[in-house]
């Protein structure tokens, strides 16, 4: 009935549905054929890179057409700007804090062992774990292969996602995970740390060392992988990420920002002072950021803040990781 209403009246309605159906059927075959050709090209490239034909066949069998839900999520991401205060309220909720306290307490020994092994603070490990997957409870329900294939075929950054799709096929062999069990976000971020396949291949680690890194189910591997990521990005052991400070309103915003690193003595001269106690004695310089401008919260951030940003290049994200980690560890 909908088709007939769209054709707007007259005896032509009697002939239109079959013609419409033939065109729709032809278009459907054409689209499926183009997608199949695309997948065949991916399969050839993956096999050429050494991925076993059986893994390629099993994986690509999971995707027979572009996933409409993936495309909708990719194309209709909300376009709005949050202030730091709004972002903080959303991601650092009372529930997130309480859940984190309980989760960290239950895994205190494991977090301590991995923190000591890699020289990365427990707070950073727990903070990233909490923000990325709500302490392992929200990893995404999309097939990573299906999502990446969809975005590689019809996405805004097709070349990027094609490269990640090929890497995901390598991950299947390296991790020993069944293709159907490789679940993640609509954009292909996987497991509890939400690693893209390229990040898995570069940073995933097992704990104890020597096994295949299971970032979906094995919490030792999850924490070791996050720790390895941060350590290899330059984490300085025993150093803080930053701390809250008071900043005089007379200090111009142009003098602030992540790139404006200065000695702590200089900041003292400008009237900047920590909210609690004195500046951390283990650091000598830092940068002051005030995300919402005069009147908003301010922080002095150190080297490890920039390392957290290597995980996600956002000041808001790095602040949230630091604050969450401090609160729950």
Image: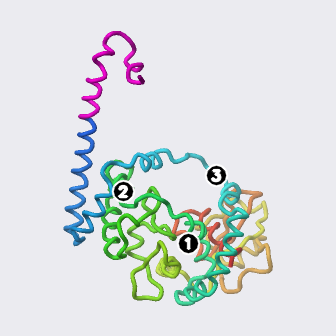
What is the CA distance from the residue labelled 1 to the residue labelled 3? 20 Å
Q: In percent of the image, x 80 and y 80: which residue is there?
A: 277
Residues in magenta, as a range: 1-26
Which numbered disc covers residue 308? 1
- Label 3 secondary element: loop
Residue 126 x %, y %: 61, 75
Asked whether residue 12 is drawn in magenta, I would say yes
Mark 2 or 3: in front is: 2
Q: Which residue is mark 2?
A: 146
Q: Earlier in the sequence, mark 2 or mark 3?
A: 3
Residue 308 x %, y %: 56, 72
Q: In percent of the image, x 51 and y 70: which residue is there?
A: 192
Residue 128 x %, y %: 57, 71
Q: Quadrant of the C terminus?
A: bottom right
Q: Which residue is mark 3?
A: 82
| Circles 1, 3 touching at the beta carbon (< 8 Å) | no
Q: Relative to 77, is 30 on the left or the right?
A: left
Q: Main secondary structure of the magenta part?
A: helix
Residue 309 x %, y %: 54, 69
What is the CA distance from the residue labelled 1 to the residue labelled 2? 29 Å
Which numbered disc covers residue 257? none
Q: In percent of the image, x 38 and y 69: which residue is there?
A: 198
| Circles 1, 2 touching at the beta carbon (< 8 Å) | no
Q: For residue 301, what is the image quadrant?
A: bottom right
Mark 1 or 2: in front is: 2
Judge the density around disc 3: few (<14), some (14-19), many (≥20) Cα neighbours within 10 Å: few
Q: Quadrant of the N terminus?
A: top left
As drawn, 225 above or below 209: above
Q: Earlier in the sequence, mark 1 or mark 2?
A: 2
């Amino acid at each position: 009935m909908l088709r007939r209403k769209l054709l707007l009246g007259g005896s032509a309605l009697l002939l239109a549905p079959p013609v419409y159906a033939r065109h729709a059927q032809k278009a459907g075959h054409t689209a499926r054929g183009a997608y199949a050709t695309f997948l065949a090209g991916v399969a050839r490239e993956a096999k050429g890179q050494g991925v076993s034909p059986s893994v390629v066949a099993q994986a690509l069998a999971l995707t027979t057409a572009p996933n409409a839900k993936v495309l909708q999520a990719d194309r209709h991401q909300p376009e709005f700007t949050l202030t730091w205060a709004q972002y903080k309220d959303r991601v650092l909720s009372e529930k997130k804090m309480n859940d984190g306290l309980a989760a960290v307490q239950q895994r205190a020994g494991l977090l301590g062992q991995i923190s000591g092994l890699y020289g990365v603070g427990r707070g950073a490990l727990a903070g990233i774990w909490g923000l990325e997957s709500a302490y392992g409870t929200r990893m995404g329900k999309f097939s990573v292969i299906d999502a990446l294939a969809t975005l590689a075929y019809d996405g805004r950054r097709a070349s990027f996602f094609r490269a990640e799709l090929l890497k995901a096929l390598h991950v299947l062999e390296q991790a020993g995970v069944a293709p159907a069990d490789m679940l993640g976000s609509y954009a292909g971020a996987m497991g509890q740390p939400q690693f893209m396949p390229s990040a898995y291949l570069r940073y995933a680690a097992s704990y104890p060392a020597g096994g295949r890194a299971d970032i979906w189910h094995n919490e030792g591997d999850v924490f070791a992988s996050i720790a390895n990521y941060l350590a290899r990005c330059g984490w300085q052991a025993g150093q803080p990420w930053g701390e809250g400070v008071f900043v005089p309103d007379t200090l111009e915003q142009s003098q602030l920002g992540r790139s404006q690193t200065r000695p702590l003595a200089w900041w003292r001269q400008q009237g900047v002072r920590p909210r609690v106690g004195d500046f951390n004695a283990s650091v000598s310089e830092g940068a002051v950021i005030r995300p919402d401008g005069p009147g908003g919260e301010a922080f002095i951030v150190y080297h490890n803040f920039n390392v957290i940003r290597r995980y996600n290049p956002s000041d808001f994200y790095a602040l949230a990781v630091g604050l969450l980690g401090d609160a729950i560890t």
